[in-house]
Amino acid sequence: MKILVIGGGGREHAIAWRLSLEGHDVYAAPGNPGIAQVGQVLATSDYLAVAESVQPDLTVVGPEIPLAAGLADQFRAKDLLIFGPSQEQARLEASKIHAKDFMRRTGIPTARFVRAESEQAALDALKEFDFPVVVKADGLAAGKGVIIAHNRAEAEDAVRALGPLLVIEEFLQGEEVSFIVISDGKNVIPFEATQDHKTVFDGDTGPNTGGMGAYCDGRILTGADTQRVLDNIIQPAVEATGFTGFLYAGLMMTADGPKVIEFNVRLGDPETQPLMHRLRGGFGETLYGAARGNVNHAGLTWKPEPSVCVVLAAAGYPGQIRTGDAITGIDAATALDNVQVFQAGTKIGPHGLETSGGRVLGVTCSGSDLSSAVRSTYSAVECIHFEGMHYRRDIAQKGFKRWRG
Ligand code: AMP
Ligand code: GLY
C-alpha cells in the first residue's frame, strides 16, 4: 500500500520504519532526515495538498495538533482514507475541561475535579482539595500545562500561570501506565501497555518533558488489569464517541483501580518507539481495516521480547534548548544487534546531521528479557554523541523495582 504518515518526530519515524519493513510504500510530511531513509519525505505542512498529489491508499496521523484542527474531517470530505479521529473526537485531548466532563458523564474513573473558568473560581475551588493538588490548563500545552502544587502559595501561582480556563483535581498516587488502542469506531485492538518517564532527571525528578524514555514489557499490566481498563475505560469511551484512531489512556494504577489522568487521541511519543520495535507485523493492514471501520483482530502480531527506548535530549531541554550541534555515532549504534535509532529533533546542516529540537533521538532496542534490552539500549546510547546531550540513566528501573517486590 501507499501510506502517507503525517508528522516529523520520533513517533512518526518509528511508524514509518515499521510500515516500510512491512513492504509499504511510505510517504511522510513534513518528515525528518531519519524518515527520509525509509520513505519519501515532502517537507511541507500542507497535508491535504500532499495527499491530493500523492493519492495514498491510507493516511496515518502522528501528532495531535492537526487532528485538533480537523485534519481527519478535511480528508474525509475529499474521500481520502485517513486513520484518525474527527475534530470533535479530538477534543478528548484538546480540552481537559471537555475530557473531564465527558468522563464524569460516562462514569469513566478519573481523579475528582472541579472545573474553573475564572481565577476567582479556581482559587475558591482549591479549598476543596488537600495538597498536593493538580492544576491543569484547559488547552493543548505539549506536556507543560500541568502543575502539581504542594501548598496554597504554589497552587495560587499555578492558577495565575495557567488560567483562566482550568481543571483543579485531586492528586492520584500509583504507577503511571500508557494504554493505547487502535479503534475502528466500535471495536478495539489494544497495544501492549507501556510506561513512559515524564520528568527530565533520574528518579522521576525535575520538570516534566514530553517523555524521556519508555519501555514495553508484558508485566506492566496483569491480564485482569488489562480487562478492567478495556471494560471500564476504553469501551465506554469508544461507545460514547464512535472514536476512530489511536486512543491513548494515560492511567494511574491506584489502590482503587485504574483511573484516567488524561486521554490522548494519538500514539504516545516515545511510547511508539518501543511498541513499533516489538511489533512483528500486520500494522499497515490493521490500520487500513480500522480506517474503513472494520478492524481485523487477527492482524497484529507481537514479538515476545521486551523493548526499551532512551531519549537523547538537547542541551537545555525541557527549557531553552540549543540547536545546531553535530550528531555522531548513529551508524555505530545501529550496527549493534537489533538497535534502531529513531530521529526526532534532527536536521541536515552544513556539517551533516545536527540537533534541531529538544528531544533529538530515541535509541531503541529489544532483548530476551527486560534487563538485557536495557543493557543493549544503553550500549547503543554510548556510541552516540552531540554537545550538551543528556538522557536518563534509569529507564525501566521502576519496572524492576516493582517486580522485585
Ligand atoms: P497530563 O498532561 O494530564 O498527562 O499530566 C502530565 C503529568 O502530570 C502526568 O503524566 C502525571 O505524571 C502528572 N499528573 C497529572 N494529573 C495527575 C493527578 N491527578 N495525580 C497525579 N499526577 C498527575
Ligand atoms: N509520552 C506522552 C505522550 O505522548 O503524551
Image (cartoon, grey):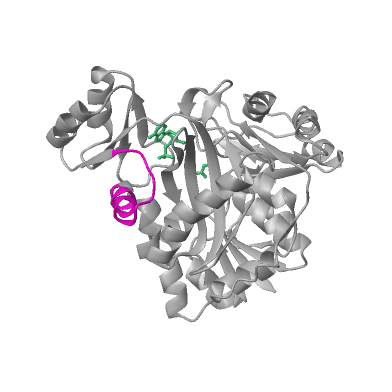
- The answer to whether residue 86 is visible is no
Return the residue found at the far bottom: 79
- Tell me the magenta residue range: 97-112
Residue drawn at 31 percent across, 48 percent down: 100
Residue 308, placed above or below residue 187: above
Residue drawn at 35 percent across, 38 percent down: 111
Residue 298: give x, y in percent of width and height: 70, 67
Compared across the picture, whether 271 is left or right of 301 comes to: left
Residue drawn at 39 percent across, 65 percent down: 241
Residue 119: give x, y in percent of width and height: 16, 34
Q: Main secondary structure of the magenta part?
A: helix
Compared across the picture, whether 328 is left or right of 131 comes to: right
Which one is nearer the viewer's eye here, 146 or 238?
A: 238
Which one is nearer the viewer's eye here, 100 or 50?
A: 100
Q: How many marks?
A: 0
Q: Quadrant of the C terminus?
A: top right
> Does residue 110 show up magenta in the picture?
yes
- The answer to whether residue 318 is visible is yes
Residue 284: give x, y in percent of width and height: 68, 67
> Does residue 252 show up magenta in the picture?
no
Residue 261: give x, y in percent of width and height: 42, 41
